[in-house]
């Protein structure tokens, strides 16, 4: 009798052990859509691959078409994540707030430096901040007295002195365009002869193919076919810092946790491997203290 009771107990225990635990973690399922910055496009795509490797039931679409597309996509609900290489403007925040009753959440994910590139054969090594404004704008709000349209005005001798400068940059939808305009043009206007291209890679490629070209893009796009100019203050000595933060914007109601899919993506971005990818692509990784604070603010798991 005792033996039969013991056997029954063992069978019952085994059956209970075979049942799924009520507290077992359920697999993450669903789809994320990211719409926004071209500068963040490669990094977002890498994080998307890491996310789907961690969570096979999740898919993610990345549309890297410019920072200006992110606010509209978040407002319309066609994207879950809005990468931007600049902060949202007051108008963009206002449009979002009018629809949802609260502001979008800005999540910094990396640091970036803007760079000015010329063709690898160009003998120029440095340029002052006000000269750069005079190359790219007609308003010259930074104080240079005349427009600079040829390489001779930047001190180059023959055969460069009579060559016209070909100017390349980003389209107005780009966060890179907005940051460069604010930091380099002293909020002035770009020249009408600026060749506006879609994507930082397109700018660098155009400069690499045009010996008279000059263009701006994220420093991470430097390659052997172009040369990065040293940008200095007008005293010719102190470096002019052209830097910015890169953001992910999300729609998160106040006092509510980040939704599970978006939280999983941010966990990837904040992970050690995620931040190593930031550095590998030429951007600046976030510090450990800031990452801990971001996790706390967003209600994410431990580091």
Image (cartoon, rainbow, N blue to C red):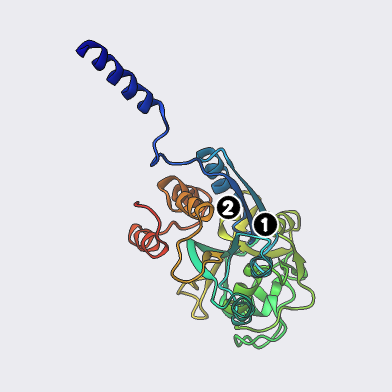
Q: Which residue is mark 2?
A: 44
Residue at 62% from the left image edge and 83% from the top image edge:
187
Which badge, 2 or 1, is on the more N-terminal residue? 2
Residue sitting at the far left: 2
Which mark is on residue 64? 1
Residue found at x 72% / y 56% = 202
Furthest residue in direction front, as rendered: 1
Is residue 100 shown left or right of residue 12? Answer: right
Quick check: 80 above or below 225?
below
Asked whether disc 2 touches disc 1, contact meaning CB atoms under 8 Å apart, the reply is yes
Quick check: 38 above or below 56?
Answer: below
x and y, in percent, of residue 86 in the image: 57, 70
Q: CA distance from mark 2 to mark 1?
A: 9 Å
Near mark 2 (Cα within 10 A), the count class, few <14, some 14-19 or many ≥20, is many
Specify whether 152 is left or right of 257.
right
Q: Report the residue at 55% width, 71% height from top.
A: 104
Occupied quadrant, residue 65? bottom right
Residue 214, percent from left and from top: 69, 65
Q: Position of residue 227 (x, y in %)?
A: 61, 57
Seen in the picture, residue 273 relative to 253 is either above or below; the reply is above
Residue 252 location, x and y as percent? 52, 66
Residue 177, image quadrant: bottom right
């Amino acid at each position: 009798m005792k033996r039969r009771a013991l056997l029954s107990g063992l069978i019952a225990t085994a059956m209970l052990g075979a049942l799924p635990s009520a507290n077992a973690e359920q697999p993450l399922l669903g789809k994320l859509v990211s719409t926004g910055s071209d500068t963040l496009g490669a990094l977002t795509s890498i994080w998307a691959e890491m996310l789907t490797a961690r969570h096979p039931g999740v898919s993610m679409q990345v549309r890297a078409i410019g920072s200006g597309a992110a606010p509209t996509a978040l407002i319309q609900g066609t994207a879950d994540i809005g990468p931007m290489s600049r902060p949202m403007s007051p108008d963009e925040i206002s449009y979002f707030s009018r629809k949802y009753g609260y502001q979008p959440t800005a999540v910094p994910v990396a640091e970036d430096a803007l760079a000015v590139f010329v063709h690898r054969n160009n003998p120029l090594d440095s340029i002052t901040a006000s000269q750069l404004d005079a190359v790219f704008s007609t308003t010259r709000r930074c104080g240079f007295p005349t427009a600079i349209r040829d390489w001779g005005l930047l001190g180059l001798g023959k055969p460069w002195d009579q060559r016209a400068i070909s100017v390349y940059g980003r389209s107005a939808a780009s966060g890179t365009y907005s940051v460069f305009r604010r930091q380099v043009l002293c909020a002035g206007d770009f020249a009408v002869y600026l060749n506006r291209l879609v994507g930082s890679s397109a700018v660098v490629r155009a400069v690499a193919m045009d010996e008279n070209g000059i263009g701006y893009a994220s420093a991470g796009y430097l390659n052997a076919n172009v040369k990065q100019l040293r940008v200095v203050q007008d005293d010719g000595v102190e470096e002019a810092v052209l830097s910015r933060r890169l953001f992910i914007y999300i729609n998160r109601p106040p006092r509510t946790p980040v939704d599970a899919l978006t939280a999983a993506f941010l966990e990837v971005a904040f992970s050690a491997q995620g931040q190593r990818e930031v550095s590998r692509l030429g951007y600046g990784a976030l510090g450990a203290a800031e990452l801990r604070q971001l996790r706390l603010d967003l209600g994410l798991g431990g580091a």
